Image: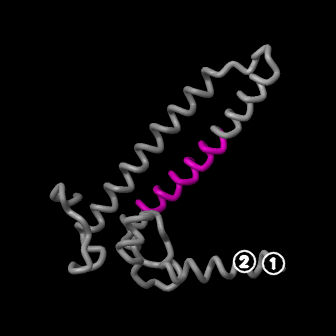
Amino acid sequence: MHPTLPPDYRPSEDEEFMNPAQHEYFRQKLLQWRRQLLKDTGDTRNSLKEENLAEPDLADRATLETDRSLELRTRDRQRKLINKIDSALRRIEDGTYGYCEETQNPISLRRLEARPIATLTIEAQEMHERMERTHRDD
């Protein structure tokens, strides 16, 4: 059973971190984002079906192929985002949502508002990115 939220509810630092209302708020936010991505994916799929790559003009066909490639990359990004959203929804269900995978510290509400699929605190994310740059330079 999920709690009912007032329409103007926003998570606050003044309340217990990841209380049932916050869980529900982020659950709804993630589900809404997921629905929008699935709608966009369906629109992209329909657009791809309607394209005719048998364009007689070479330039037109090249443009269509470039557009198609862009749309396929967009769909791949959307698919990956949906997987991350599903993972975040599972973390809400198991009670680990909102906590850093590296440090187990709370992820700031501002960060979760901006990126509800975040799995790391800003500090852990920055450290992770520094490590990636260091290893990439090798």
In terms of depth relative to the viewer, which is nearer, 99 or 95? 99
- Circle 1 SS class: loop
Pinpoint residue 30: horizontal percent, then vertical percent. Answer: 39, 55
Any magenta on residue 110?
no
Residue depicted at x 18% and y 59%: 8
Is the Cβ of the residue at disc 2 closer than 8 Å to that at disc 1? yes
Which secondary structure class fits the magenta region best?
A: helix
Q: Which residue is mark 2?
A: 133
Pinpoint residue 106: horizontal percent, then vertical percent. Answer: 39, 81
Residue depicted at x 52% and y 83%: 123
Kind of residue at badge 1? Asp
Any magenta on residue 86?
yes
In the rendered view, does 38 fall on the left or right side of 20? Answer: right
In terms of depth relative to the viewer, which is nearer, 88 or 43? 43
User: Where does the C terminus fall, quadrant-wise?
Assistant: bottom right
Q: Which residue is mark 1?
A: 137
In the rendered view, does 80 fall on the left or right side of 90? Answer: right
